[in-house]
Amino acid sequence: MSENARLVGTVSRGIRCPIIRQGDDLAQIVTDSVLNAAKSEGFELRDRDVISLTESIVARAQGNYAHIDAIAADIKNKLGGETIGVIFPILSRNRFAICLKGIAKGAKKIVLMLAYPSDEVGNELADWDKLDEAGINPYSDVLSLERYREVFGVHPLEFTGVDYVEYYENLIKECGAEVEIIFANQATAILDYADCVLNCDIHTRARTKRLLKKAGAKAVCGLDEILDASVNGSGFNENYGLLGSNKSTEDTIKLFPRDCQGLVLEIQKNILEATGKHIEVMVYGDGAFKDPKGKIWELADPVVSPAFTEGLIGTPNELKLKYLADNDFADLSGDALKEAISASIRAKNGSLVGNMAAQGTTPRQLTDLIGSLCDLTSGSGDKGTPVVLVQGYFDNYTN
C-alpha cells in the first residue's frame, strides 16, 4: 500500500456547542463550533464532509413552540369539539402525551383507538403468544378495554415500565374529557364510535385519511394538519403540523423546525468562505433504524431530514467488495486483488441497480443513512453534541 494511501474511512464526530436559545444566530454558532473543534482536535475539513445538526436546536433557535391551548383551539375548529375519534397514536410521553393533553382539552369525549399488538413504531401493547392463545385476529377484531384487560392484563412497555393504556386514559380524564378506549387495526373501525376523526399515524397517514373519507367520515384530520398554521401567535409547521413535535414543558411542545433550507445553505457558504472547502449540510431528526430487542422502530419523525444541501440528494451507488473478492477475482490475492477491485470501482458507470456485484449495499436515501449515523452519534441524552461532523462518507477503496 502506498505511503499516501488513506488508512481511515468514515469518521463521525460529535461537536460540542453552546446551549441554543430562541433568536440565536445558529448558522454562525454551528460554523464556529465546527471550526473550533477542528483547531482543537487537529483535524482539517475536506470537500464533501457533512455537517449535520439536530432538528431540536433548529426549532429552538426559531422559537417554534406552542401551548396545549393552541392545540385545543385548532382541534375544536377543525373537528367540532364534541366526540372525537383519536386513532393510531404512538405510545410516548415525549412525543404524544403532551399533544394528547391539547387534543383532550379540545373535545367533550375522546374515543381512543390503539393499534395492537404494537403501535406504528413498535411499542408493544400486547403479547403475540397470548393473542394467538385467545384466538384473536388483530387484522379484523376490535377489542374493548375490558376484553383487552381480560386477555393481556397490565402490559407496561419493557424499557419504560409505563402502562400506556392507563396513562393515556387518566391523562384524558384529567383534561376534562370523557374517554373510551378500544383496540383495532382497521382505520374504519372508529366510525362505529365517532364520525369526526383525528388520525395520528405518521408514515401511513395518507392511506388512513383516504380510507376514512371513503367510508363516510364527517371530518378527518391528521396530526400533520393540526398547527399547520399559527393559532393565536403559536409556533406551527406548515408541512407536518404536530408530527415530529416533542414535549418542552408540561404545557408546551416544541414543533418540528420549518424553513430550514436557508440555514443549511448559509452554513455551507460560511464554511466555504472560511476554509475554501465545499461541504454538505443537513438537519436531522430521528434515525431510521429498529432496535432488535425492544422491536422499536426509531423513526417517529415524519422524515429523517427536513432540509439538506444538493450534494445529499440520491442514494449510494456502490459495489460489494466481498462479492468481487469471492466471485469475479477469486483467483487473485494481495496487490493484484487490490488493483483489480480498485479498477472495478473506478470503472463503475451509471446506476448499479440490478447488478449482482451491488447486492446487499442498501441503496437507501443518503440523508436517511447519514441521519441514522448522526442520531446514534449525538444520542438523545446529555452528550451535548447536537452537531455531528461526518468525514470520509463518500470515500471508497480507491481513495
Image: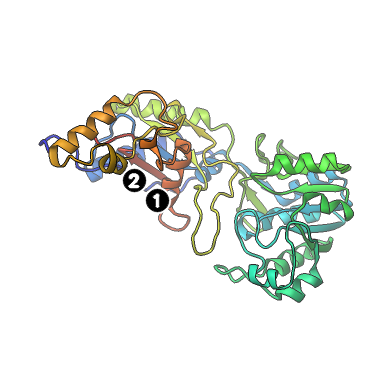
Give the tally of numbered discs.
2
Q: Which residue is depicted at the point 81% across and 43% down?
A: 212
Q: Which residue is mark 2?
A: 12
> Could you say which is closer to the camera, residue 7 or residue 237?
7
Q: Position of residue 397 (x, y in %)?
A: 25, 36
Q: Quadrant of residue 348?
A: top left
**Are circles 1 and 2 on residues that touch, CB within 8 Å?**
yes
Q: Which amino acid type corresponds to the residue marked 2 in the rendered image? A: Ser
Check disc 1 and report its element: helix, strand or loop: helix
Q: In this rendering, does residue 227 appear at all?
A: no
**Upstream in the sequence, badge 1 or badge 2?**
2
Q: Which amino acid type corresponds to the residue marked 1 in the rendered image? A: Thr
Does residue 206 appear left or right of residue 244 in this picture?
right
> Could you say which is closer to the camera, residue 68 or residue 225?
225
The residues tagged by marks 1 and 2 sit, at their Cα atoms, a distance apart of 7 Å
Q: Which residue is mark 1?
A: 377
In the picture shown, does residue 123 fall above or below 272? below
Q: Quadrant of the N terminus?
A: top left
Q: Position of residue 88 (x, y in %)?
A: 72, 53
Q: Residue furthest left?
A: 3
Q: Which residue is depicted at the point 60% across and 54% down?
A: 121
Q: Position of residue 250 (x, y in %)?
A: 66, 59
Check disc 2 and report its element: helix, strand or loop: strand
Q: Position of residue 384 (x, y in %)?
A: 41, 53
Q: Which residue is depicted at the point 57% across and 39% down?
A: 257
